[in-house]
Image: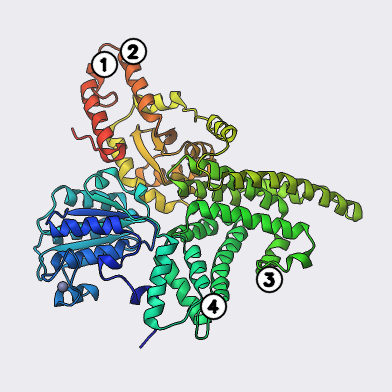
Amino acid sequence: MSYQALYRVWRPQRFEDIAGQQAITQTLKNALVQNKTSHAYLFTGPRGTGKTSAAKIFAKAINCTHSQDGEPCNECDLCQSITQGKLGDVIEIDAASNNGVEEIRDIRDKANYAPTQADYKVYIIDEVHMLSMGAFNALLKTLEEPPANVIFILATTEPHKIPLTIISRTQRFDFRRISPQDIVERMRYILTQKEVDYAEDALQTIAKAAEGGMRDALSILDQALSFSEGALQTEDAMRITGSITQELLEGYIEALYSHETEKGLNILHALIAEGKDPSRFVEDMILFSRDLLLYQTSQADTLLKMAKADDGFAELAEQVPAALLYEVIQVFNETQQEMRLSNHAEVYLEVATVRLTQARAAVQTASTAPSSGGADDQVQEVAALKKQLAEMQKLMQNVTANQGTAKPAPQKAKRSSSSKSVFKVNKTSVHRVLENATRQDLSQLKDVWPDLMNVLEASQKAIMNTSTPVAASPQGLVVTFDYDILCERATNDTILLDAIGEYLEKVIGHRAEMISVPAEQWPIVRQEFIKQMKEDSTSAEDNQEAAAPDPKEDQIVSEAFKLFGESFVQVKE
Ligand SMILES: [Zn+2]
């Protein structure tokens, strides 16, 4: 028999076995017992916190005829064939691979057929945030008129990428990171069942490294067990957990150093997909960069004692200029501040990654600083490095001061909010677009927008990811961004603007100037324009079919926008 990963073998088969989510599993069990289930659920939370396990258990419990207290029996034919993934009425879809509109349309058609063997057809759509806009719209139609005896369970690690219209039609459950104690307990249970001896510290080490994901914990445990002979030792656990983190951090720094934006973003996305806590990543990066700098400035042999200083680490320390490491610490320090004010940490990390991989100028000025060779230069270099180190230590103090405390130092907080400059919208350009705006132009753009993401480079995609076209004329378009910082980058990035222009020329036949507006400011800018239109002309009614929406209709539309979110309301005439 081939080896099976621990997390597969020990996948929970009952709600009771799902660690650390008691509130959720109890609510689901109650709903099952009282026949008060919903036709659509949204399970959100980091990877490895039990979302898909809960979905499968739910599919069993609702169909099992011997279910007790909301738990499936796991013994009847239905339960077993669901466990094995063989029951045709329980359909698992990985949106990461099936993100097309066609597949969802297919679901829509098939969902209308009654289940064949079970009482309920259950669709489990994993990584649902990966669906394209078209596919979301198709899914929305199904959720609006749910067929009888069909239940949708949507699972995602990134709920902010899901349209509000979808979220509002589901019952949402947020899965939390699993506490280290709960993870340790589960590992202890598994090891006892497997009759494997273990050092208690080894379990603690693994639980800490897993950062709240059971799946991660069990795959680290898997590796550690393959390392150790007989009993699980603390050293084995430390060797595995240390090397995983360090390898990724090294790869990330390498990507920054070689200006490989795509590689940097890929490592970042891989880390987040694996359940790495973004703020923990920021802390790790700052500490790792500090270690590299320390290694560069100190005597190598004293540092060789550091567990970190393996060959890869030493090589990296020799390659990477101190100026870049210094910049990494600074940028991540800023990112840490920004992330505190936002729920969408990932976006800030993407921006930081793009910034750092493109930080060519800073690196070059530092490494091409005048140098005539000789001992004097070395002395100077050391002095410069020492100065940087002192500044860095000051930065580090801020970082550690901010760690774990809910409130950053008051002065710091004040500065970060006042220095958060408000993006200045180019109102003249926006008005020029609005004056000639037509719905046809806008709907044409909305149709092609999702595909634009496919032609952009990873770094450009990171900027455009939260963009939405909100108005368009034949010559121009207005696009909103969820974040000021991205709006600013989109406005100033001429290469990006060119790429978008070229793409539009290809698919809609002409270039159109893109004007960026922060989503927050858009309703105000738009209202201003409408007001101005009314003032400019009292006979606006004669001339309104294309540009200015009728005020009453407009009121309805903005109500609709408030309800459903701007991008998902289509104004039909
Ligand atoms: Zn059963």
- For badge 2, the amino acid type reads Asp
- Residue tagged 2: 536
Q: How far is disc 3 from disc 1 in space, using C-alphas?
A: 73 Å
**10 Å neighbourhood of mark 1: few (<14), some, or many (≥20)?**
some
The residues tagged by marks 1 and 2 sit, at their Cα atoms, a distance apart of 8 Å
Mark 3 or mark 4: which is in front?
4
Mark number displayed over residue 540: 1
What amino acid is at disc 4?
Answer: Gln
Q: Which residue is mark 4?
A: 233
Q: Earlier in the sequence, mark 2 or mark 3?
A: 3
Looking at this view, is 379 or 229 the one in front?
229
**How many angstroms separate mark 4 from mark 1 (CA)?**
79 Å
Dots 1, 2 in contact, CB < 8 A: yes
Res. 188 visible in picture = yes
Query: Can you tell which of label 3 and label 1 is closer to the viewer?
Result: 3
Q: Residues within 10 Å of mark 2 (few under 14, many from 20)?
A: few
Residue 359 on image: x %, y %: 63, 48
Q: Relative to 493, say whether 177 is above or below.
A: below
Rendered location of residue 81, percent (x, y): 19, 76
Query: Residues under labels 2 and 4: Cα distance?
Result: 79 Å
Q: Residues within 10 Å of mark 3 (few under 14, many from 20)?
A: few
Q: Residue 494, image x and y in percent?
A: 53, 40
Residue at label 3? 311
Farthest right residue?
Answer: 375
Q: Is residue 320 above or below residue 444?
A: below
- Which marked residue is nearer to the observer: mark 2 or mark 3? 3
User: Is residue 6 rendered to the left or right of residue 81?
Assistant: right
